[in-house]
Image: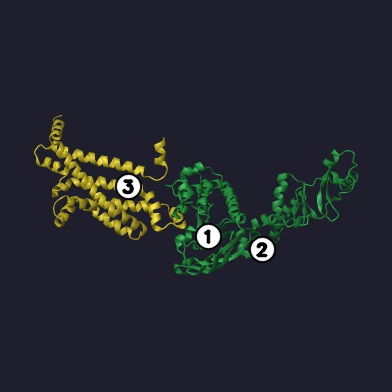
């Protein structure tokens, strides 16, 4: 009971601060994923069309994913210095694997018969990509973005160690205070909520973009 | 319209998928390519729209070497239907049908009009336009696949085993439809299949391929009558060859050349006398030049009781007759369907040459079954 009260007390007194950090953390993750998408989706498309390259590229992304977050931040800090930009870059690297992998899978899974029909009817490479491959793999690509966003929201909390701010600041403050459980929770709960909301929203978007009639039908019924 | 000149396709490892092909196709022909798997039939077809490039030789479309044309432009002028149908699942039926017109940037109204026009062609209502492919049955989907190939009205259409994934009943009706459409729209069609029945049913000319070479390229009748060598015979199948014999037989081969006839000017009472003497219940009426005028039968005479009139007063002129040279298979159908007892055979000048009776048909079918058995026995 006391804990809840302390938590409420904290939120009431620091509402603006918590909100600021919430937005900050979200923006860092969103930018990370955005840059990840800008780089990762074209790479995914490219290796889907030249799939001899795919094991190399995907292994590389895998390797990036296995680097511990703290180590990654420390190394990047040596090069890029302190601050949110370094964190965004790290998040960008972490979001690459799910985005590349899903784009690759989505495009590779387009029925080859459909592609042959398109080619045989005289569609150019770009038309096939724009009118067939992308629409048909959009939901899978969205699933990749969803995974990436949820991962990066979690990782962004440790950005506090290199002075990037975010909800991690609140959690860290809690760990540095004796009896700081309430403060730790005050930072951790919004992080979890953000991850869940992002997951739900992206999941909804993904279903919306699933090709075929299902989404159109559900609107009628 | 389409000409292959010394065309070969060599794959890695010096495998010749297509070996020095030379042939020509006329406008409006329905050509079926057939052969065992790996014979090069699909390769041959795909070289026409440059999905596969030949290693040697030239392919001319309306006198133009297609290797000098832009492949994208070329493909937009050639319809293409594939076995797996390949409709775009995220597009409506209308969007699917009018894909090529859209690529060619037709005005939208024209696209929509064309799409419903085409649906009408296969007796599908316009409300299908806004549906999605997964709401249609396999047969309907492939109909749409065919319409999509017809959308921009290309003179040439390529079909790669389009019906082989459909159930037999749907396949049958689609085969009839496509043959109909092809005649009606005067399209040239190059059709790949491994199903001999399908080939015999659809083709104007069948090209039988083996190891990348043409073994025989001829009309279905000619191939059945004179198969070029053992390979073709085996490929068609002994059973089918014997079954098919009545189908390539003409009426002349089983005709009864001396039917009972009367002149139009004799009296009915005399006609009855002839019937009794010859033990028949109907007479063909033939004039002095031997031309068929009609017939009379017992029923008609019976209604005219005092038999004082002449045959010419009561004869029925409107009757079913066939020309010499007609295939027996076509006659069988009509005889069975209309329940006719016999059919007169006439030449181009309407002179009576004889009749085909049901007994003649039995003989023809009997021969085709048993003569082959007997030959088989001798061979053993």
Quadrant of the rendering where the C terminus of chain A is positioned: top left
Q: Chain of mark 1?
A: B
| For the residues bearing labels 1 and 3, Cβ distance under 8 angstroms | no
Foreground pick, A146 / A209: A209
From the viewer's perspective, tell me whether residue B52 is left or right of residue B278: left
Q: Which residue is mark 2?
A: B226
Label 3, residues with CA under 10 Å away: few <14, some 14-19, many ≥20: many
| Nearer to the camera, A32 or A219 | A219
Disc 1 crowd, CA 10 A, few/some/many (<14, 14-19, 20+)? few
Answer with left or right where residue A155 lies relative to residue B288: left
Relative horizontal placement of residue A48, taking residue B21 as reference (left or right) = left
Percent x, y for residue A106?
36, 51
Q: Chain under label 3?
A: A
SS at circle 3 = helix
Residue at left offset 80%, top offset 54% = B354
Residue B373 versus residue B316 in the image, above or below = below
Q: Nearer the viewer, mark 2 or mark 1?
A: 2
Location of residue A104 in the rendering, given as x and y in whole percent from the top left corner: 34, 54
Q: On the image, numbered disc 1 is attached to which residue?
A: B37
């Amino acid at each position: 009971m006391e804990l809840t009260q302390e938590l409420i007390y904290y939120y009431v007194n620091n509402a603006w601060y918590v909100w600021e950090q919430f937005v900050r953390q979200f923006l860092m993750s969103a930018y990370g994923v955005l840059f990840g998408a800008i780089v990762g989706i074209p790479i995914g498309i490219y290796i889907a069309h030249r799939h001899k390259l795919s094991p190399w590229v995907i292994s590389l992304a895998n390797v990036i994913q296995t680097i511990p977050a703290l180590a990654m931040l420390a190394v990047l800090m040596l090069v890029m210095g302190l601050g949110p930009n370094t964190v965004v870059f790290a998040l960008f690297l972490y979001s690459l694997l799910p985005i590349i992998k899903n784009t690759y899978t989505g495009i590779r899974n387009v029925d080859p018969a459909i592609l042959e029909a398109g080619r045989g009817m005289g569609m150019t490479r770009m038309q096939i990509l724009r009118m067939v491959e992308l629409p048909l793999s959009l939901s899978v690509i969205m699933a990749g973005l969803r995974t990436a966003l949820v991962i990066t929201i979690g990782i962004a909390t440790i950005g506090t160690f290199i002075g990037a701010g975010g909800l991690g600041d609140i959690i860290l403050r809690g760990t540095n205070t004796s009896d700081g459980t309430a403060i730790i929770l005050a930072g951790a709960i919004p992080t979890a909520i953000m991850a869940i909301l992002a997951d739900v929203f992206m999941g909804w978007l993904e279903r919306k973009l699933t090709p075929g009639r299902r989404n159109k039908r559900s609107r009628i019924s | 319209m389409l000409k292959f000149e010394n065309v070969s396709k060599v794959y890695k490892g010096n495998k010749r998928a297509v070996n020095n092909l030379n042939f020509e196709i006329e406008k409006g022909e329905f050509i079926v390519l057939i052969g065992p798997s790996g014979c090069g039939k699909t390769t041959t077809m795909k070289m026409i729209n440059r999905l596969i490039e030949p290693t040697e030789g030239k392919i001319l479309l309306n006198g133009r070497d297609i290797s000098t044309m832009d492949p994208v432009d070329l493909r937009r002028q050639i319809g293409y239907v594939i076995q797996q149908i390949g409709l775009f699942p995220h597009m409506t039926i209308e969007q699917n049908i009018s894909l090529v017109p859209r690529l060619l940037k037709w005005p939208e109204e024209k696209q929509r009009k064309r799409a419903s026009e085409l649906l009408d062609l296969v007796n599908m209502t316009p409300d299908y336009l806004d549906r999605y492919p997964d709401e249609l049955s396999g047969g309907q989907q492939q109909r749409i696949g065919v319409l999509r190939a017809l959308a921009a009205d290309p003179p040439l259409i390529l079909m790669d085993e389009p019906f082989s994934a459909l159930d037999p009943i749907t396949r049958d009706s689609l085969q009839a439809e496509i043959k109909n459409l092809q005649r009606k729209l005067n399209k040239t069609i190059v059709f790949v299949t491994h199903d001999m029945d399908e080939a015999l049913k659809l083709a104007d000319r069948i090209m039988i391929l083996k190891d990348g070479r043409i073994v025989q390229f001829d009309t279905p009748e000619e191939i059945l009558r004179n198969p070029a060598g053992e390979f073709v015979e085996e490929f068609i199948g002994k059973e089918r060859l014997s079954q098919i014999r009545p189908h390539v037989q003409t009426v002349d081969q089983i005709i009864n050349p001396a039917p009972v006839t009367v002149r139009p000017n004799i009296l009915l009472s005399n006609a009855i006398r002839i019937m009794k003497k010859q033990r028949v219940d109907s007479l063909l009426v033939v004039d002095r030049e031997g031309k068929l005028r009609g017939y009379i039968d017992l029923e008609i005479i019976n209604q005219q009781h005092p038999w004082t009139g002449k045959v010419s007063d009561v004869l029925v002129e409107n009757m079913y007759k066939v020309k010499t040279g007609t295939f027996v298979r076509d006659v069988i159908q009509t005889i069975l369907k209309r329940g006719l007892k016999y059919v007169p055979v006439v030449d181009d000048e309407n002179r009576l040459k004889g009749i085909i009776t049901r007994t003649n048909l039995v003989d023809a079918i009997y021969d085709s079954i048993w003569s082959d058995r007997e030959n088989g026995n001798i061979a053993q």
